[in-house]
Structure formats: structure tokens, C-alpha cells
Image (spheres, rainbow, N blue to C red):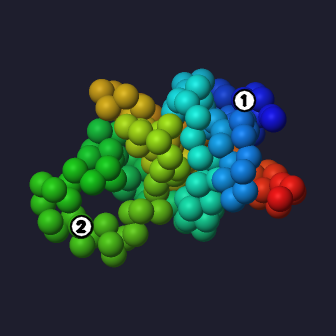
Amino acid sequence: MECKDNIIGKRDLFAIQYGVERIKKPYIWGHICYWINGVMVGDITQTTILSDVFIFLPRIIYDNGNRIHELFYTMNKDKVFYFLSGQAFIDNPKYEELATIETWARFSIEIGLDVFSGTTVKLIENERNGRIIFSNDKKGIYEFSLQKGIADNVFERFSEKINDFYENIDE
């Protein structure tokens, strides 16, 4: 099987690292993590059902190019995290309605696999740049700026790779 050294993107910007361990159609077991500004997000050592990415990738890719929000882009990272992580909904129900109207879910770039348990990753953009705000350990909130489209490109390339891989599995 493939090793865990398959990397799409650049670790010092944004990348997805993955590897395949075992296949029994329709399932692919393997490993996955993100790299954001040189920080590993997720647990590449843990085996997961890698084929479950097909549940999450379409939504992430659908929102490519649709993550512009000038207020969130310029807001303090702690406030952005408060609003987009769902805590604001608990504290004040009016934010749930606003989130629905403004479709705040479009900022989520999390793949909901067990290897990402405890992580939150949001991508907010302006006309030229992107800003990733994430928590990898439930203790700290981190942010990283990158050129608009870099993360989108990584997700598109990863989707193509995993789709090609899946379509070429022998029964």
C-alpha cells in the first residue's frame, strides 16, 4: 500500500498528507492530516476510514471561492473562532439565525474524521488573501495568512487523487 508521505501542497503553507493502509471495497483505511504553517493538524499515526472523506470533500470544494467575509477577515482571531465554532449560538440564539442567513458553514474546512477529533479549522478570505483560524488542541487558537486559492487548490487536487485511487481499486 501507499506510504503516509503523500503530500499535496506545502507544509509551510497548507497541505494534506495522506496514505493508504488497507482496501476492502467500499472502504479505504488509511491516514490523513493537514499541515498549516508547518503545524500538523490531525493525527497521521492513527488509522481511519479514509474513504469517508467523500462525505466531507464535496461541501468543502463547493464553497471554494465563496469564503469572502470582510468583517471576519479583519476581526480578532478569538472573536472569529467564537462566532464560527458555534459557541456564539449557545450564548445568544440570534447568532444562529445570522449564521444561517450568511451561511457561516462555508468557512469550515474540517474533514470530520476521528483523526481530526478536537480540531476546528476555518478559512476566511478577502479579495486577495485567505486567513486560516484553527484550534488543534482545544487550548490555543492559531491563525495563518496565505494567498487566496492555495487551500482551495489543495482540496481540489486531493479530491482528484482520492477519486482516481478509488476508481482504480480492483474488486
* Residue at image coords 37%, 37%: 118
Residue at the location (32% across, 50% down)?
85
Image coordinates for residue 14, horizontal then vertical, percent: 63, 37
Q: What is the three-letter code of the residue carrying label 2? A: Glu
Residue lying farthest bottom? 101
Q: Which mark is residue 4?
A: 1
Is residue 14 something one can see in this rendering? no
Foreground label between 1 and 2? 1
Disc assigned to residue 96: 2
Q: Residues within 10 Å of mark 1 (few under 14, many from 20)?
A: some
Q: Nearer the viewer, residue 30 or 33?
A: 30
Instruction: Reply above or below: 4 against 71.
Output: above
Alpha carbon of mark 1 to alpha carbon of mark 2: how far? 39 Å
* Rendered-image quadrant of the C terminus: bottom right
From this view, report whether residue 155 is shown above or below residue 9. Answer: below
Kindly state the secondary structure of the residue where label 1 is placed: loop
Examine the rendered structure and indicate whether residue 169 appears above or below residue 93.
Answer: above
Which residue is at 12% across, 54% downward?
Answer: 91
Q: Residue 93: x, y in percent?
A: 15, 66
Q: Looking at the rendering, which quadrant does residue 79 occupy?
A: top left
Amino acid type at mark 1: Lys
Q: Quadrant of the N terminus?
A: top right
